[in-house]
Amino acid sequence: MSDVIKTDVLIIGAGPCGLFAAFELGLLDMKAHFVDILDKVGGQCAELYPEKPIYDIPGIPHVSGQGLTDALMEQIKPFHPTFHLGEMIETVEKIGDPLFRCTTDTGKVFECKVVVIAAGGGSFQPKRPPVPGIEAYEGTSVHYAVRKMENFRDKNVLIVGGGDSALDWTLNLHPLAKRITLLHRRDDFRAAPHSVEQMRALVAGGRMDLRLGQVTALSGADGQLTGATVKGNDNNVSDIACDTMLPFFGLTMKLGPVANWGIALENNLVPVETSAFETNVSGIFAIGDINTYPGKIKLILCGFHEGALMSQKAHRYVYPEKRLVFQYTTSSSSLQKKLGVN
């Protein structure tokens, strides 16, 4: 077992609701760690619609998904939450009253008094490309995320996709890899224009390869990739030598390991009571899109409300001997001091 990370609260999911929950918890002197399967904070806002306008955040007539994420990150700065990205909580075990041991898919272990599930519709899972036999290579030479860049040093890397993830990793891994080949089904990319320009400059300079088409087969023994067969847009079939493949075909939402944590479920959602949005397991809360209760509305602003009430109940678990006195940030000098207000 790795060294145990101890914290007051573990927040599973770093979307808007989880981020605001860290603010409410911080006001009450509770420290939080985040775990999120994505490689960046913001949840659906940052991953699925970073530039999409949002019009129903109170007091903000118009903000993008990324803009909201950036503002929430600025808001929680005074409380210094710790983020563990590109990881997924696999097990949650109750070991005290209250005390939980939570373990990620990479073996990282947390101990906390409160668990807050703020995972949206569940965990984001990468979409598997329709390539026969790809399962045999997954985790060995086919990867759906980059956990450690160093693992790709001196590799012949085939990156498949045309969005931001594909272009970002093409550019980030280029200095490390022996050779990068980017494969996309068409010569039109959904990524940031600047990234596309950088990629095309590398191709023009002969420093990487760009191919148009789709992977139809993989070759290699014992899970180790040696090449990929590609059918081009002109229907010609050719092979690309590679020992690692990174397919970026988007993400899908799945409930994931939450189903194995001993929490009651209802139609793949987590039922909660509405005074603090606590699950049937004392000390485990669910806020945002992943929870359900009579009258539930799936809006970000509702998740903010849920996070505020959750934090009041969480305080009882973290500080059972301490009386909670409700204060307003507009008038409380102690809260303003925590926020760094002069």
Image (cartoon, grey):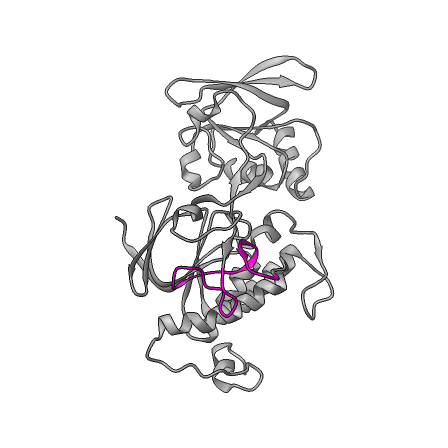
Q: Say if residue 77 shows up in the picture.
A: no
State the residue at coordinates (52%, 86%). 332
On screen, residue 93 versus residue 19, left or right, reads left
- The stretch in magenta equals 272-295
Q: Residue at x 61, y 13 (%)?
A: 237
Q: Is residue 200 above or below residue 268?
A: above
Q: 278 or 225: which is nearer to us?
A: 278
| Residue at 72% across, 61% down | 55
Percent coordinates x, y for residue 234 in the rendering = 70, 16
| Above or below for 216 versus 128 | above
Q: Main secondary structure of the magenta part?
A: loop
Q: Residue furthest left?
A: 1
Q: Quadrant of residue 315?
A: bottom left
Residue 72 placed where, x, y %? Answer: 57, 64
Q: Is residue 279 magenta?
A: yes
- Residue 125 among magenta residues: no
* Residue shown at the point (55%, 49%) measured from the top left: 121
- Give the percent coordinates (x, y) of residue 318: 36, 71
Q: What is the quadrant of residue 194 in the picture?
A: top right
Quarter of the image that includes the C terminus: bottom right
Provide residue 223's location: percent of width, then percent of height: 39, 23
